[in-house]
Amino acid sequence: MSAARPAGEKPVRSGTSLGITAAKKVYANRSRLSEIQRLPVRYRMSEALIDPDLLPNMYLSNHVKQIFDLYPRVLSTYSTVMGDPELREAMARFFTRQQGIAVSAEELMITTGSQQAIDLVSRSLLKPGDTVLIERPTYSPAIDVFLNQNIRLIPIEITSEGYDLAQVEQFMKQEKPRLFYMNPTFHNPTGFTVPASQRKLLVELAERYQCILVEDDVYP
Ligand SMILES: Cc1ncc(COP(=O)(O)O)c(C=O)c1O
């Protein structure tokens, strides 16, 4: 488990366009997702993509037009580091009223997709050599993010009964993981939702062993 250069791979020159092209190639070759995507399969379970016919395209297109009328300069500027304040206010209202999670806009940060969020969590909370629990199977780009930062990964089986909490406790006690990265609601690719009773016990374990629970709630 190391981000060291694989044998035969040339060092990447930085600061030149050749460096950037080579870096992209190295990244694509190292990424587990692209490795999985190259396999010849009939059903590709590594991607969770929506059928485009199910998207409310007409509504979205009308809405985007309204945004350009309201904010004609929106495409020619950067947002703030934390993300658009109006969006964060709207999300805070959504979480508080509809999800029962009382958060303020100041506590929310908008990222460019989950991978950036996982990367930020990993870089701010972990250091090389730390241990992280992940589900097996899990979202493969998360594996890439953690391995690229030299994190030691321990898989937790996710079965039709959910997690084996005795196993989780044993790992938390012995291996002292800093965090558990999980997708407990409509888990990809099994579709499993961890029952409330297990979640409660999991939170108790996490508190007891000081392990941060990072929930990737991509399908709320
Ligand atoms: C568990 C999980 N997290 C994140 C994502 C991707 O999310 P985003 O498009 O926001 O990067 C997926 C998509 O397959 C996923 O299954």
Image (cartoon, helix red, strand yellow):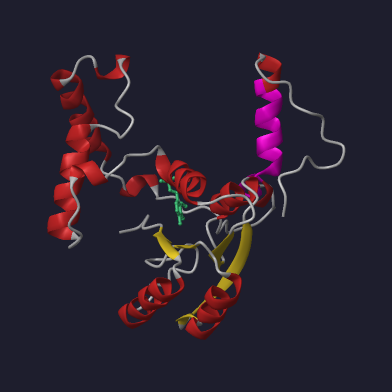
Q: In which quarter of the image is residue 27?
A: top right
Residue at x-position 64% and y-position 55%: 129
Range of residues picked out in magenta: 20-34
Classify 106 as above or below 44: above
Which residue of the protein is positioned furthest toward the right in this rendering? 8
Q: Is residue 134 above or below residue 74?
A: below
**Residue 8 is a magenta residue:** no
Q: Where is residue 178 in the image (x, y as percent from the top left)?
A: 51, 62
Q: Where is residue 52 in the image (x, y as percent from the top left)?
A: 38, 44
Residue depicted at x 32% and y 21%: 78
**Residue 79: quarter of image:** top left
Of residue 51 and residue 49, the one placed in the foreground of this image is 49
The question of residue 31 being in magenta is answered with yes
Depth check, front residue: 101 or 33: 101
Q: From the viewer's perspective, tell me whether residue 105 is left or right of residue 39.
A: left
Picture quarter with the N terminus:
bottom right
Q: What residue is shown at x 57% (from left), y 56% (from top)?
A: 44
Q: Quadrant of residue 63?
A: top left
Question: How many numbered circles does the render carry?
Answer: 0
Q: The C terminus is located in which quarter?
A: bottom left
- Percent coordinates x, y for residue 180 in the rendering: 48, 64
Horizontal side, residue 105 vs residue 77: left or right: left
Q: Position of residue 72 (x, y in %)?
A: 20, 15
50 vs 201: above or below? above
Residue 53 located left or right of residue 38: left
Q: Is the magenta stretch mostly helix, strand or loop?
A: helix
Question: Horizontal placement of 208 versus 100: left or right?
Answer: right
